[in-house]
Image (spheres, helix red, strand yellow):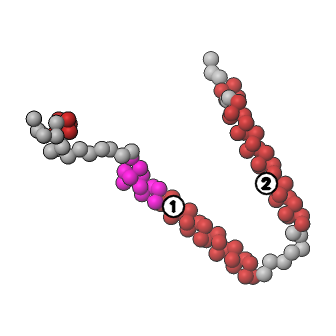
Amino acid sequence: MAKTAASRMGVGSWIVLIVLLLLLIATGVVIYFGWILASGADVPTSGYAAMAFGVIISLAVGFGLMALLFYSSRKGYDEPPVLIVPEDDSVESERDPEGK
């Protein structure tokens, strides 16, 4: 018998879901009031240029970070660290430092 997604969610998952939905509603309210209160405001050409420059720089940073993420994943830099023990440094030499 397959469980539904709602029955598999615990209390913590419901709390996170409710908080995220409340944040989405609050964002919508802020956008609405910002749109209503800013009606009739003119944006100069320098404002549009600054906005375009910010969008381009943000996209470049995002693309660059994603490229680094994929590069490091392909080259194996994301693997967990492994202890490499030299051949002349065995476990027995650590137990008996004088070589006896």
SS majority, magenta = helix
- Residue at the location (26% across, 45% down)? 84
- Residue at the location (76% across, 48% down)? 23
Amino acid type of the residue that numbered disc 2 sits on in the rendered structure: Thr
Q: Furthest-left residue in view? A: 100
The residue wearing badge 2 is 27
Amino acid type of the residue that numbered disc 1 sits on in the rendered structure: Leu
Q: Furthest-bottom residue in view? A: 45
Residue 84 as seen in the image, left or right of residue 24: left
Asked if residue 40 is positioned above or below residue 91 in the image, the reply reads below
15, 35: nearer the viewer: 15
- Residue at the location (30% across, 44% down)? 83
Count all numbered tags in the image, as a single digit. 2
Across and down, in percent, residue 59 comes to 59, 66
Image quadrant assignment for residue 43 = bottom right
User: Bounds of the magenta span?
Assistant: 68-79
Image quadrant assignment for residue 14 = top right
Q: Furthest-front residue in view? A: 98
Which numbered disc flags the more N-terminal residue, 2 or 1?
Answer: 2
- Residue at the location (64% across, 75% down)? 53
